Image: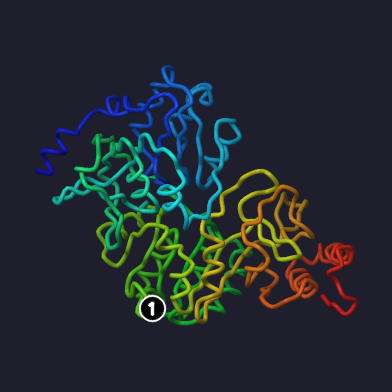
Amino acid sequence: MQHELYQRKLVTAEEAVKSVKSGDWVDYGICVGHPVVTDTALAARAGELSDVKVRGGISMWMPAICSIPDPGNHFTWNSWHCTGVDRKIIEMGCGYYSPMRYSELPGMYRDNVETVDVAMFQVAPMDEKGYFNFGPQSSHLMAVCEKARIIIVEVNRNMPRCLGGFEEGIHVSQVDFVVEGDNPPLAQLKGNGLTDVDRKVAELIVAEIPNGACLQLGIGGMPNAVGTLIGESDLKDLGVHTEMYVDAFVDLSRQGKINGSRKNIDRFRQVFAFGAGTQKLYDFIHDNPQVMSCPVDYINDVRRVSMIDNFISINNAVEVDLFGQISSESSGTKQISGTGGQLDFVMGAYLSNGGKSFICLSSTYGKAGEPKSRIVPTLTPGSIVTASRSCVQWVVTEFGKVNLKGLSTWQRAEALISIADPDFRDDLVRAAEKMKIWRNSNRI
């Protein structure tokens, strides 16, 4: 029965994308699940289409619809979370960021997004029960499908089959068109190697992690550096409950550091909303019952995170000001990434019994010989506050770590200046004095 349905719905990419009309809203899923051959087929129809709005995000490659001449005349890209690719599309003038707390995204589709005319995304091959697995992008895809007028699945034999959770796949009876893609290998997200700053920050954080802790690692070098140093430590019985599944978790699993035995919920399971990494990650999560793929409103729910003892959340930042405000998604008005789950995990980890949230950043950035401080008097005008000062707990640079909880404004200023690059501390003190958040008895 399932195979008969499959054959009836099997069409070419060109035939499938005829369902897209001018003015439509089209959803591409997220990250490694973005479509390939159907995206190319849609781009080929650009001359007959206008005002097609496409949602995607965490883009790992440039979509074909944005690679055509004058793409903005035909398509508008709307990203839920920006990578370098998404930033480039925005700079091209045909893309925009869509602000959201990632935990709310499935609910936003069900309650706030008015229209999904066509959903098209890559899936794993249909199983014997007739289901197409979403691969490492359960995220919000079921909510997209529930809202979509037309659903096109693009089969990729290289897509890992991610088990164990719920809302991780769709039945052939629920889709409108099946397209057999070109089976490209999944996009690789490779690390850049540890810098001395990464290692120093990671050492400061790892010292705060107890045996049996449950880990959430954000995107970027420093969170992955923490994973590397955990592998070099004596820590054991660790768990995973994370928005993004990354290579560091694979390494720690193979080293025997992760078993999930002390988790309060989803014991023995590594739980995630989406994943991207090298081929070893895709091989590890394929058909692995130890790894549990779930929608993001389950993973990032502050209430659920707070139920897990010793929850450790580790995320990056762009800037922190002397009031303790964290900007992790923009530099001025230039969008860099997105809110994602940072605020959810900052709040959830603090509420966890024994939990801690860490915001980590290098003390400076910029060209050699022209450093600029990431700890600033006030955020760069236009910068978005990702985590408000009332929520932030630990902030870490290579010069130290400070816990801002319970501190007044002058104590926060003193603490944050103490972990700034020494070359900038005098200027920061003077700025704090002007802003009336410095006491004469303060010491650095």
Residue 124 can be seen in this image: yes
Element marked by disc 1 = loop
Task: Kindly indicate the quadrant of the structure image that contains residue 38.
Answer: top left
Task: Kindly indicate the quadrant of the structure image that contains residue 35.
Answer: top left
Residue at image position (31%, 49%) is 134
**Relative vertical location of residue 221 with respect to residue 256 in this rendering, above or below:** above
Name the residue beneath numbered marker 1: 264
Q: Position of residue 229 (x, y in %)?
A: 51, 71
Q: Position of residue 245 (x, y in %)?
A: 41, 60
Badge 1 crowding class, 10 Å Cα cut-off, few under 14, some 14 to 19, many 20 or more, is some
Left or right of 259? Residue 328 is: right
**Relative vertical location of residue 6 with respect to residue 374 in this rendering, above or below:** above
Residue at image position (29%, 48%) is 159
Q: Position of residue 226 (x, y in %)?
A: 52, 68
Left or right of 101? Residue 1 is: left
Amino acid carrying mark 1 in the image:
Asn
Image quadrant holding the N terminus, namely top left
**Relative vertical location of residue 393 with respect to residue 119 in this rendering, above or below:** below
**Relative vertical location of residue 95 with respect to residue 421 in this rendering, above or below:** above
